[in-house]
Amino acid sequence: QSAGGTPTLATAEALDRLASALTASGSHDAALQALERSLRIKEGLSARTPSSLARTLEGLASAAQGAGQYEKAGESIRRAQELQESSDPEHPAFVETLNLLAQQLWFEGHLPESRRASERAFALAGRTLRPTHPTLLEAMRYLASTLADLGDLTQSHVLRERALAIAEREFGVGHHETAGYLNSLAMAESQLGAYPAARERYERALAAVVPRYGRSHDYVASTGLNLAILDVKLGDYAKARLEHGRAVAIWQRTLGRNHPFVAVALTELATVLNEEGRPAEALPLLERALAIREKNLGSEHRDVARTLADLAAVFAAARQPTHAQALATRALRIWERLDAPDAPEFAAVLTLYAGLQARRGDAAAARTYFERALAIRAKVFGPTHPAFAEIQAGLASALATLGDRAAALKTAVTAETTGRDHLRLMLRSLPERQALLYAAARPRGLSLIFSLGANAPDAVPVGLDALIRSRALVLDEIAARRSAANAIGGHSTPTRVALTSAQQRLANLQVRGPGQMSPAQYTALVAAARRDGEVAEQALAEASAEFRAERTRARIGLDEVRAALPADSALVSFARYDRTILTEPRPGPMAKTLTRASPVVPSYVAFVLRADRPAAVVPVGSARVIDALVSQWRADIAVEVATTTTPGTTAASSR
């Protein structure tokens, strides 16, 4: 202060520095108090400059964003933008203003506008800052995030890879500043289906931030939450539930019970509970998340639409279709009003809505919405991604209900093949427990193929062949992990390295999708990568007898199993599946629009295979009934064992 006690510019700038430290530590309310005092001081000074005032307003915006006070943040950052625009829009400091504006627009749900602000920040940083400046890296990361939300996963991934490479050079591989870029790239890889790579980066990010901030910091909660979302994709619900619960606890303690981040964690935790078949526990979490989001974000925000869709899924699981339909319709209308036609989240809402139409018996509408969702995912991910296969499985069911059994079978087989191919890419890279969980959770079309077998004999051999290949894939991987001779032919030989490299190129293309390439360009690249893999595979097969045997086992299907059966023998195989009870479409004028809903019943089926005749399928019955009988049988055995081994008797004396 001045000698007379009047606050000076130096006082205001000291308050700004204090607020910056408070914001970094998570003390957003205290930071806001310091910044509001600084702003009052500067506004009362005749010698204030636009840039100095803009810095305080930016600090206010950052602290308000951290506190979840997005309206206050929006007012501050837009005022700072006006000051910078009128003063010197080409000044390097304006990059930080634009970065904050891009974040604010993202929080507000204005994705195209956020992208434009980030593009402007990135361009200005490129003109005015060194190529490795932290503010430029931040612009790159914000732009990449928004591009991913809008559906441009390929360009997003490129930017994130570039930003991480620079961060690792500038800060260090294990530095806490690098953790944000590890987390960012891991999110892209998770979206693209590269789950092992994403897991490795998330774990590296946690290892960098925990020693710096402790286990109860906002950054730790964010990274842990993202890792849990990945665990859900892998089917590891127990681990995901634990991590989501930890994020809820951290954010409630550090940010308050009604912060928007708490709603994020509540929503993800509810998703896990619903996936585990516990919709009653998920419902109150989602209702609370919806209240938080509507209060902080308004009723038309994309995050509100996400929560509405999750609520619809819970009500559908709880067999309350009317509530589910109303919520899904509202979510769909919000997304249709947003300027984000290729957003992966929009495809997810379309898929949910399609499934609800199928449940209420409107298979024609279901097909329309499944096809809309497929068009988005084909553009964003490509036709070889598991997210594409997931929708194909739903579309196949709608086609079957409409009576187009041939198209349904073809679509279901394609979904099953795509899911199995992605599983093959994942198996060798995931820990065994998670590999087995993903094998159970991955997209598949087997259930519908088995359901079609009752009325379409040509579905029986197709389904049995897919079952054999799917089981063989998992069992062979388990055997390979157990085998002491796992290093067949020497993984370090040039032929093995060439094959691994070619397979990795193909995997990268499949998980990244076409991006901005045309379908023809993408198809040509995939074909070339597959061809390179086949050439490398053939070269290794010529050099290694062990690899030839390995390759032969990997190609075993129905024909090979039948040929290996001895004469006068039979192979019986059982499978559990979700049986869709298919009926013919209703005749009359409503046949094209309204059909009977197809109930789904968990069931068992048996296949009987002989060497000299077609495979036979035998419906065994409802899984509920059979599981109860098996449980009773096991209980009877346990009782019998207990009574025959009571004290004073032995198994021998009781016989």
Image (cartoon, rainbow, N blue to C red):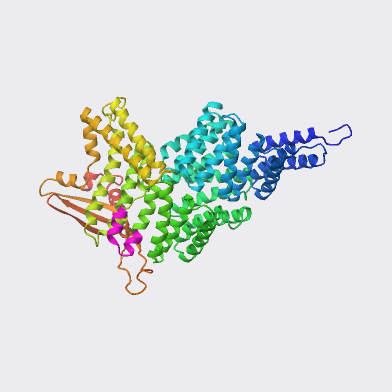
Q: Is residue 25 magenta?
A: no
Which residue corresponds to the image point at 40% horizontal and 42% vertical from the top-left? Answer: 511
Q: Nearer the viewer, residue 305 or 601?
A: 305
- Kindly tell me whether residue 25 is visible in this rendering: no
Query: Left of 140 or right of it: where is 596?
Result: left
Whether 459 is drawn above or below 91: the answer is below
Q: Quadrant of residue 516?
A: top left
- Kindly tell me whether residue 586 is visible in this rendering: yes
Q: State the predominant SS element of the stretch in magenta.
A: helix
Segment colored magenta: 397-412
Q: Is residue 405 magenta?
A: yes
Query: Left of 49 or right of it: where is 388?
Result: left
* Quadrant that contains the N terminus: top right
Which residue corresponds to the image point at 52% horizontal and 43% vertical from the top-left? Answer: 225
In the rendered image, the residue lying farthest to the left is 567
The total of numbered circles placed on residues is 0
Q: Nearer the viewer, residue 67 or 170?
A: 170
- Give how far across and how far down residue 92 sits, in percent: 65, 34
- Give how far across and how far down residue 628 sits, in percent: 32, 57
Q: Nearer the viewer, residue 191 or 249?
A: 191
Query: Left of 193 or right of it: where is 454?
Result: left
Q: Nearer the viewer, residue 474 or 329?
A: 329
- Give how far across and how far down residue 436 sits, in percent: 35, 42
